[in-house]
Amino acid sequence: MTPLKNDTFLRALLRQPVPYTPIWMMRQAGRYLPEYNQTRARAGSFLGLAQNPEYACEVSLQPLRRFDLDAAILFSDILTVPDAMGLGLQFVAGEGPHFERPLRDEQAIAALQVPDMGHLQYVFDAVSLVRRELDGSVPLIGFSGSPWTLACYMVEGQGSTDYRQIKTLLYQRPDLLHHILDINARSVQAYLNAQIRAGAQAVMVFDSWGGVLADGMFQQFSLRYTQQVLDGLIREHEGQRIPAIVFTKGGGQWVRDIAASGCDTVGLDWTARLSAARLAVNDQVALQGNLDPMALFGGDAAIRTEVRRVLADFGQVGKGGHVFNLGHGISQFTPPDAVVSLVDEVHSASRAYHA
Amino acid sequence: MTPLKNDTFLRALLRQPVPYTPIWMMRQAGRYLPEYNQTRARAGSFLGLAQNPEYACEVSLQPLRRFDLDAAILFSDILTVPDAMGLGLQFVAGEGPHFERPLRDEQAIAALQVPDMGHLQYVFDAVSLVRRELDGSVPLIGFSGSPWTLACYMVEGQGSTDYRQIKTLLYQRPDLLHHILDINARSVQAYLNAQIRAGAQAVMVFDSWGGVLADGMFQQFSLRYTQQVLDGLIREHEGQRIPAIVFTKGGGQWVRDIAASGCDTVGLDWTARLSAARLAVNDQVALQGNLDPMALFGGDAAIRTEVRRVLADFGQVGKGGHVFNLGHGISQFTPPDAVVSLVDEVHSASRAYHA
């Protein structure tokens, strides 16, 4: 493999000295880019895009052609794993994803198994392809939904506003939910390890729905299983350390618990105060975040002001580590020019914090 | 006015000694009660219910006939104030509320004014009626949406998942948003004061959407205006202190800032750890919360376990104050019997913490 030309991102994740704060964006390969929409139209559907390694590779690389980003992330969907378990992933235009066969009875839950990773070969092929095409320019991030977040979709069958089905299970039959989560943790572990073997140079666990859990339940039903994933993860590959990022949307109150899970970096949404989070974790992990994605609608001057506010909130990097990101995925309505301002300001204004 | 037979709720809000932890529930007069649905059917619509003092009184009292709750809350909607401003509140069956004339240009924003409280007389009449009908059994809570939360609906025109319209305004034209928020703060203050004069014995500000703001922005665009409301609130009426509660959904990270706003009690959702929040505010305010409303789907034993967990998290009440509540409104799908278990367990298990 070609040696990395820009390893700023990997170094920051591991709290090693860097000359500036690296940046990438959650959902950076997405609908705000006209070229993404063109490729998606050619692919015919979202699943057609995600399940075809050539298309997935093409859209993964698109944002890097436009913007001076410090990492690439595989274009994929977090629901590939439950789909491989046989739940039947469907995307209906204008609605979110749903499963044809959600887990709604004890029998279905008992029958759940870690899927054959062969069913996910298209993902690993996409990883290999993106890695090769990147040709060492920037590192490639592999990812998965967290065991809890996958379980939300698997039990609800679709997005939810109240998570009533899965929380009824949690409070009524925690044993069944623990069974699902254990299967999910083993599946996610195998999935991420296969991505690492295929060439992913860092991995991220998206705990998108961890923040809907009560304090105490988050630790038992989400974080515990993320930790199980991390415990069995390949942490060194091709002689390089593979950093792991855990991002819990709405998890700011639990940053200390998350930091103790064994990850290298904790991702935070925009409601968190980086200075307080940094104090809470005592620089034992790096932090990733946390600009409000809606700040990108403010125009050049406001974007630059908000970037400087986030950088100042983290402060002098010293022995810590900061990877700049949005606090959630970039909105499909974002003007691409806003990202130019964002990346430029992060790269230029952050140098003072790495003195 | 009849003297109060049960003042446990008011005393707990003010951190005075009580024999047990009082409880009420957000949205306790609501769709989970068959008798509510019957009254609503008679009223013809949600607005017909909210705008008719007799119906509003009837549904406000319904939960108290079934459950041994320690407070009543006025049945109303948080959008009455922008409706009185002339934005044209509409409820379409199966969808949420929306405004016919949302604030989408500078001219509309400049024209915004504190509404004539005469347009809200139906609310104050309902307050007087409920207060009279309660006959001193338990105190009556008046309420309003926070200036920020009202602004979200006024600018978005309806519920939102990304708050793109109002956040674009926030980042692009903060001056215009500050103007809206100032008008809202003066309106909410007048509205709550009129409720107090009509008989409300405590008031609550629902900052339902404060938690979507970035750290820093929450303080500037939400809390600052809630504080403006509190600064001009009638704090004593009929010789009694009128306690004020501020509830910010998703505001657990900001509990210390909220406690400094001048409120007596901070409401918390289920993601917060009461013990940590209590430490952060150093018992300078009481706390209200914070059972996950979905725990009511767990059955009698799980409900009682979760109640005890919340009580234990707050711990020995001592010089603090704890009002039990859900962390958000009760779900329309809740079996009413679950509330019997909830109230019974709070009342019986809490006595040990008031020794």
Image (tube, coloured by chain):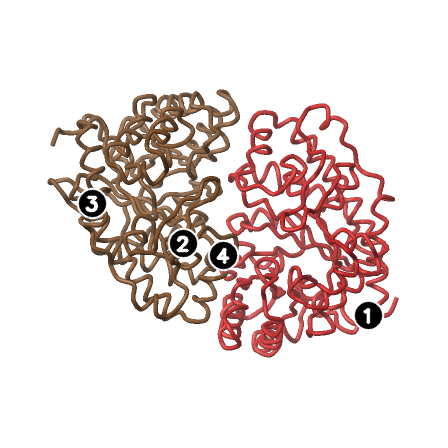
Chain colours: A brown, B red
Q: Amino acid at mark 4?
A: Thr
Secondary element at image label 2: helix
Q: Position of residue A77 (x, y in %)?
A: 34, 43
Real-space CA distance between mark 2 and mark 3, rounded to the nearest whole angstrom: 22 Å
Q: Position of residue A268 (x, y in %)?
A: 41, 43
- Check disc 3 and report the residue beneath it: A121
Q: Amino acid at mark 1?
A: Gly
Q: Position of residue A181 (x, y in %)?
A: 33, 61
Numbered disc in front, either 4 or 2: 2
Real-space CA distance between mark 4 and mark 3, rounded to the nearest whole angstrom: 38 Å
Badge number at residue B271: 4
Q: Is residue B48 above or below residue A292?
A: below
- Check disc 2 and report the residue beneath it: A153
Badge number at residue B136: 1
Real-space CA distance between mark 2 and mark 1, rounded to the nearest whole angstrom: 48 Å
Q: Earlier in the sequence, mark 1 or mark 4?
A: 1
